Image (cartoon, grey):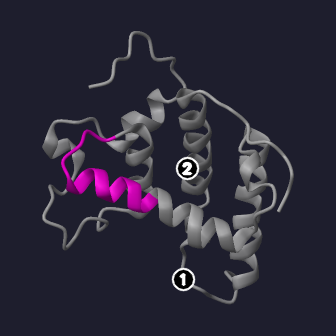
Amino acid sequence: MSNRKPVKRSRDESQNIKNSILKDILAKKNILFGKFSPVLTQEKKINTWDEVRKNAIAAGETSLTDKNAEYMSKTYWQNRRKEAIDRKMIGQDPTENDLLVFSIMGPDASSGMNVPESYEELGAPGPSSAISSSSKARVGATRK
C-alpha cells in the first residue's frame, strides 16, 4: 500500500473527472465491450482498459495510479454502472454521468427492470444532450 495522502477535491471536480473517464469509455466502447474476433482480442481489450486508466490519471484521478486494467473493467466500470442503475431504479433525476453510463450500456440496458425505457420518458434530457452540454459551464446550478 502506498503512503501517499488522498487528494482532496471538490465534488464538482470529482464529477468532472468521472465524466472525462466515462467519455473515454464511451469513445472506446466498441473495443471494450465488443465481441471477441481475430481482430478484437483479450489483449486489445486489456490494452484499451489500461489506456483508459492512464487517461484517467492524466485527468487527475490519482487513485488509479496503482490499479490495473482488470480493476478498471471489473471494479471501476461496474461501480459506475451500478450507481447509475440504482439511481434510475429509485426514480432519482439522472446525473450527467448516469446519462453517459446508459449511453455506454446501450438501449437494452434497462430491459427487465421495472423502470421507464429512457430518461426522456421521465422528462429528462437524453444522453446526447449531456454529452454536448458537458463542455459548457454550469451557471446557477442547484441541487434538489
Q: Residue at x 37, y 53 (%)?
A: 84
37 in magenta: no
> For this view, does 17 lie left or right of residue 128?
right
Closer-to-camera residue (119/16): 16
Q: Is residue 91 left or right of residue 64?
A: left
- Residue 9 placed where, x, y %? 65, 30
In the picture, the quarter occupied by the C terminus is top left
Expressed as whole percent of the image width and height from the top left, the position of residue 129 reads 37, 34
Residue at x-position 37% and y-position 62%: 106
**Relative height, residue 116 to residue 95 (above, below):** below
Residues in magenta? Answer: 81-94
Residue furthest right as drawn: 3
At label 1, which amino acid type do we have? Answer: Lys
Q: Reply above or below: 39 against 101.
A: below
Horizontally, is 45 left or right of 129 in the view?
Answer: right
Residue kind at label 2, given as amino acid type: Leu
Q: Which residue is mark 2?
A: 22
Residue at (60, 70) in percent of width and height = 73
Which quadrant of the rendered structure holds the N terminus?
A: bottom right
> Residue 35: which disc?
1
Q: Secondary structure at mark 1?
A: loop
Tell me where residue 143 sits by quadrant: top left
Q: CA distance from mark 2 to mark 1?
A: 20 Å
